[in-house]
Image (spheres, rainbow, N blue to C red):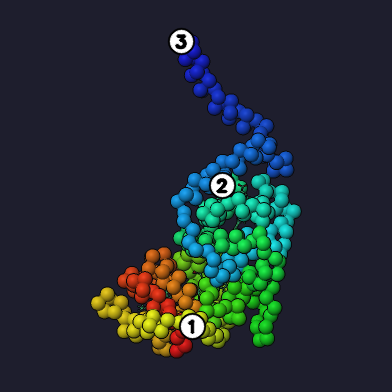
Amino acid sequence: MIVRRKYIIAAAVLLPVVGLLVGWSGLIGVRASTGHWAVTDWFLHWVMRNSVRTAALSHEAPPLDHPALLPPAAGHYEIGCAMCHGSPARPRSETVKQMLPEPPDLVPVISSWTDEQLFEIVQHGVRFTGMPAWPTQKRPDEVWSIVAFLRHLPSMEAERYRELSGLYPPPMEGEVDNLPLSCESCHAERRLNAESLVPSLAGQSETYLVESLRAYADGRRASGIMQLAVSSLPEEAFGDLARYYAGQERSVRNPADVDAGLVEQGRILAQQGRAADKIPACLSCHEKPDGNPAYPRLSGLSRPYLTRQLQLFVDGVRGGTKYSHLMNEVAKNLEPEDVAAAAAYFSQRSE
Ligand code: HEC
Ligand code: HEC
Ligand code: HEC
């Protein structure tokens, strides 16, 4: 009995030492070129699928059928995913196919995952594989829009993908075509409608635009989509871009179903606020000709965009410029009905 125990202790001490020696000897291959053994490959995928399946139990997909979810998601896919996974407009590159594990062509695999599982993979990434996490953990709404896009991917034609992502938009008359293509791909005024989740930048305050770009670049305003879009821009470009957009005319977009009662409620909130709930009049800061130029112009922004931003303020995750705390103070007292009313009012207001 005593002898047995001796062997066990010796083994417990020796095994890690042997393990270290084997690691030190350089005999364990790390070459990507030889690939994994089939059994290792099977095991790693099995572990990954189990892990994703379990973690996904804590997520619940919101409705994902709104068409406005697709354009910003497709644009982000083009900038942030297509180089590894390919897209309907371009196959995966040969270089990427030499990665271990190889980033898969997503077309045949999407249907093997539920929406919640896709969310888990895109939000958190996959360790040791090159599959990155979403740039911020504060914007599940953005990740869900990627899931909505991934559902359409398997049946998407190249033409439709180009249109959604804004790849190679044909330059229009009077448009500066030496701008980074990427901003216009999502923000071009002609690509937006009353339902867009991408904000119109046309006619927005120049100071607000520059400060917002800085806020994305420093991570003070959380958005995986915008953080990636500005990551390759030198800060010197911010001023030019802001001037370009500030100088444009914002189009009038008439939302399809305007609820007159809701708009009226929004007008009262905007002009008078609600003293009982410590809500100041929105127009005491916004849209004032002699107001602080860092305060954004709201009139004519789309209702879904306004709603989403207000909700982010209400949830305390919006961030932004050095004045954003003022808006957080306001939003803290807003009820869901106020958010809906204010968004309805400002979306159809033309000053
Ligand atoms: C640097 C390369 C790289 C980038 C960029 C990348 N991925 Fe991946 N992705 C991978 C790799 C590698 C895997 C395989 C992980 C594995 O084998 O477990 C993967 C796996 C996946 C999977 C699971 C596929 C399956 O069935 O195994 C999905 C879905 C996915 N990625 C979506 C995305 C999306 C959406 C983006 C952009 C937001 C993205 N990926 C960006 C490399 C990348
Ligand atoms: C893939 C689509 C996409 C691309 C490319 C993109 N944007 Fe955006 N942009 C968005 C979305 C979506 C938002 C809303 C983000 C949020 O929720 O904060 C946004 C927000 C903004 C805002 C804040 C506007 C506001 O009213 O608060 C500015 C400024 C901006 N983008 C400028 C740019 C510039 C300049 C570029 C080019 C360098 C660019 N964007 C590229 C999709 C994009
Ligand atoms: C005390 C001044 C102040 C008041 C009052 C105020 N806001 Fe704001 N609001 C701001 C500031 C400052 C910002 C810019 C935040 C940032 O730094 O990005 C902002 C941003 C916003 C945005 C985001 C715009 C965009 O393009 O992303 C919306 C929407 C908004 N406010 C709606 C409202 C509504 C609705 C009310 C009234 C209920 C209101 N605000 C009252 C100061 C104010």
Which residue: 50% across, 81% down?
A: 255
> Dot 3: what SS?
loop
Marks 3/2 in contact by CB < 8 Å: the verdict is no
Residue 127: assigned label: 2
Q: Which of these two is toward me, 66 or 45?
A: 66
Q: Is residue 81 visible?
A: yes
Sooner in the amino-acid sequence: mark 3 or mark 2: 3
Query: Which amino acid, mark 1?
Result: Gly
Residue 17: assigned label: none
Q: From the top left corner, tell me how far across and down residue 163 is, in percent.
A: 66, 72
Q: Residues within 10 Å of mark 2 (few under 14, many from 20)?
A: few
Q: From the top left corner, tell me how far across and down residue 216 is, in percent.
A: 50, 67
Name the residue tied to disc 1: 300
The furthest residue to the left: 276
Which residue: 50% across, 63% down?
A: 63
Which residue: 46% across, 84% down?
A: 348
Horizontally, residue 169 falls left or right of residue 293, namely right
Sooner in the amino-acid sequence: mark 2 or mark 1: 2
Q: Relative to 8, say whether 344 is above or below.
A: below
Query: Which amino acid, mark 2?
Result: Arg
Query: Which amino acid, mark 3?
Result: Met
Residue 1: assigned label: 3
Marks 2/1 in contact by CB < 8 Å: the verdict is no
Q: Which of these two is toward me, 240 or 327?
A: 327
Callout in the foreground (3, 1)? 1
Q: Quadrant of residue 89?
A: bottom right
Structural distance between the alpha carbons of marks 3 and 2 = 44 Å
